[in-house]
Amino acid sequence: MNWELNLAILLAGVATFLLRWLPLRQNPGRHRTLPEAATRILAGIGPAAITALLTLSLASLVQFPLDNRALAIAAALVFIVVCKRFLGGIVIPTLAGALVYGVIAAL
Amino acid sequence: MLIQVLRGLASSLSIAAGYLPIAFGFGLTALQAGLSPLSTVLTSVIVFAGASQFVLVALLTSGAGMLSIVGTITMMNARHLFYGPTLRPWLLADRRRLPTPLLAFGLTDEVFATALGQREKLPPEQRQAWFLGLQLGAYSAWVGGTVLAIIFGPGLGELPRFAEATLEFILPALFFVLLLEVGVRHWAGVIALTILVTLGLSAFLPGYHALVLGMLAGAAANLPERST
């Protein structure tokens, strides 16, 4: 039983790895120019992926009827904007925003 | 090269801060579900894919067949198919210094998003080493968090409420910061359409399907010619 379980884990890992690797793999000598539309969609994938991840992660925190988590989210997002504007970078605004959320959500 | 790897490691700090508690939670969940410590660590070492690891544990312990396990995990992670083509022109703009399997192994949502946020700031010859460092930091935190759960999890009491809440908001905060980094005004149409479609579909579909469809719909908003 244990070897079957570990085999399933291994196969799931291989499948995940292939999803990440195959599109990144470069085939030497086959440089194709993508059509304009594909280039535009690929350019938009990044911001769209970040937005979709943010949307789902925030949606999972919001509960109805609204509790102080909704207020905590709003306060944290505003704090992050301010923090990012004046301090820049990624790490400090992220951790500071999470701390603001944590304090308000725990009230 | 080493300096760039270290810079990548430093850039992974916010990802690591988010991954540690989630991986810790994964470790506890897997142990409680009856997985051995070895299988639990193996999952984080080999799969390295947040939400799908939780689903994997649920499937394993429910006695699901091999085919449905691998099929479900593949579907859940199908969005990763779009990350490679987006990053490839940027990552491989210079000659290939590192093998692509090494660059692809740790390409998680957060690694992808962080790389996008930073991509304007790195010259081509530094990108692969920086990206490797970014992945290493994220991967170490993920595997480390799982190992910590196995060592300390069973004897650990409950965290204070504010600490729990802080930890649950690290990844949303990271995504928001990264969105600011890529430029909210520049991508306003893409962002608005992604939110609408993702939220709308998440009412009917599992989150990972809503994510992929929302992402594609939002990206399609970039199709019309920009005036700027």
Image (spheres, coloured by chain):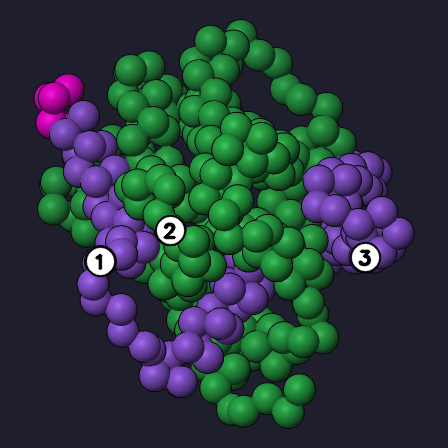
Label 1 vs label 3: CA separation? Answer: 43 Å
Q: Which disc is residue A81 wearing? A: 3
Query: Would you say B49 lies left or right of A15 here?
Result: right
Give the percent coordinates (x, y) of residue A4.
11, 27
Disc 2: host chain: B
Q: Main secondary structure of the magenta part?
A: helix
Residue B212 is one of the magenta-drawn residues: no
Q: Quadrant of the C terminus of chain A?
A: top right
- Residues tagged by mark 1 and mark 2 found on one chain of the structure: no
Q: Chain of mark 1?
A: A
> Spatial distance from mark 1 to mark 2, Cα to Cα?
11 Å
Residue at image point 71% right, 40% down: A91
Q: Kindly indicate whether the residues beneath marks 1 and 3 are on one polypeptide chain.
A: yes
Q: Which residues are magenta?
A: A1-5
Residue A5, quarter of picture: top left
Which element type, helix, strand or loop, lies under badge 1?
A: loop
Label 3: how many residues lie within 10 Å, few (<14), some (14-19) or many (20+)?
Answer: some
Front residue of A80/B31: it is A80
* Chain in green on the image: B
Residue B95: assigned label? 2
Chain A shade: purple
Q: Nearer the viewer, residue B118 or B61?
A: B118
Q: Is residue A4 magenta?
A: yes
Q: At x 18% / y 25%, what residue is drawn?
A: A6
Q: Earlier in the sequence, mark 1 or mark 3?
A: 1
Query: Three-letter amino acid code at disc 2?
Result: Arg
